[in-house]
Image (tube, rainbow, N blue to C red):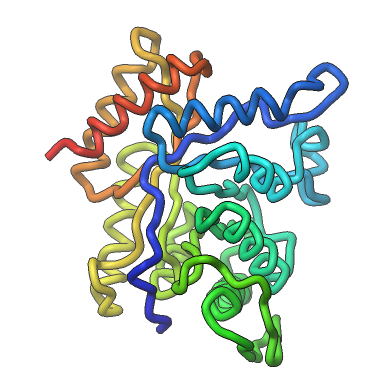
Amino acid sequence: MVDLADDVRVPRLGLFLPGSTVGSAAPDAFERTADLAGAAEAAGFDSVWVPDGPLPADADRPGAEEEFEPYSLLGALAVRTKQVALAVLPDGAPARLPSLMAKIVAGLDVISHGRAVLSLGVGPETDGLALEQLDEELQICRALLTEDAPSFTGRHFRITDAPNRPRPVRPGGVPLVVLSDHRQVLEAVVDRADALVVSGTAAEVIDRTSTVRRRGEAAGREGSGPVILWTCDLHAPDTPGANGDDRQLASLVDAGVGGLVVRLVGDHGPDGVARAADRLTAALASP
């Protein structure tokens, strides 16, 4: 089991940035995205998240071909913000080699003065082979982000005396996050990930949180395992769905969810972002 660094801080209040597409009808797409990231930072969000595209695997996803390459977008946002962590919200299996991921994210961490997050997703396959590959990816990423010239030999990947320059700003590397709703995946990565991003209804997330906690306790993880982040839609106040959002938030915080990554529904302006931050901060602070 890899010891997780005490100085790696997992973001707890994230905003998924909409409108991060570039096309003939949106020449100001980046400026709008940067303005929203700035509004999130000013409102108290501690992280902003962007979609993982465009990639060959996204060919059938509507609009994917018009999305910014995510790490290029985060690099630009790094110089337009000062405090928020910068992360990708993956929607499938990794399309980049783990050594390349570590290289990209280490550079982003330097550019942003220590605000990068490395996140991995999973595809539809959750068999032993897929879990083994994800485990190797996490090990390689952790090693390249924390060690001078690590070596690793696995069934799927291998590195030999691999340098990773520039090194991340934080001595403990950057947070490693896995997004999945599969029980097998959540159980498999408890020993490797700093945080897990899950979705679903309150009942489903509570069940997944319990699974992670039990597995973490069995593995001897301090704090019973990685931080659980719930990704969800958040409706503007006084709109259909808002009351249901608040009830789910209360249930999930009671169940041990440690943070949120939200998509705003119906209000994407600075005032809407500020109102959302106030609601979410109150929910996370509630006893």
The residue at 42%/25% (across/down) is: 234
Can you tell which quarter of the image residue 261 is in? top left
Residue 128 visible from this viewpoint: no
As rendered, which of 80 and 91 lies closer to the eye?
A: 80
Residue located farthest toward the right when viewing the structure as drawn: 24
For this rendering, which residue is in front, 46 or 62? 46
Q: Position of residue 108 (x, y in %)?
A: 63, 57
**Eyeballing the image, is 163 above or below 171?**
below
| Whether residue 208 is visible | yes
Query: Residue at the location (31% across, 31% down)?
Result: 280
Farthest residue in the left direction?
287
Residue at 64% x, 91% y is 151
Q: Relative to the observer, which residue lies in front, 108 or 216? A: 108
Q: Where is residue 274 in the image (x, y as percent from the top left)?
A: 39, 22
Residue 230 picture quarter: top left
Residue 162 spot, x, y in % from top left:
69, 85
**131 versus 120 height, above or below:** below
Question: From the image, which quarter does the C terminus lie in?
Answer: top left
Q: From the viewer's perspective, is 280 left or right of 110? A: left
Quadrant of the rendering where the N terminus is positioned? bottom left
Horizontal placement of 254 versus 191: left or right? left
Q: Where is residue 236 in the image (x, y as percent from the top left)?
A: 41, 15
**Residue closest to the eye, 250 or 261:** 261
Is residue 198 rendered to the left or right of residue 118? left
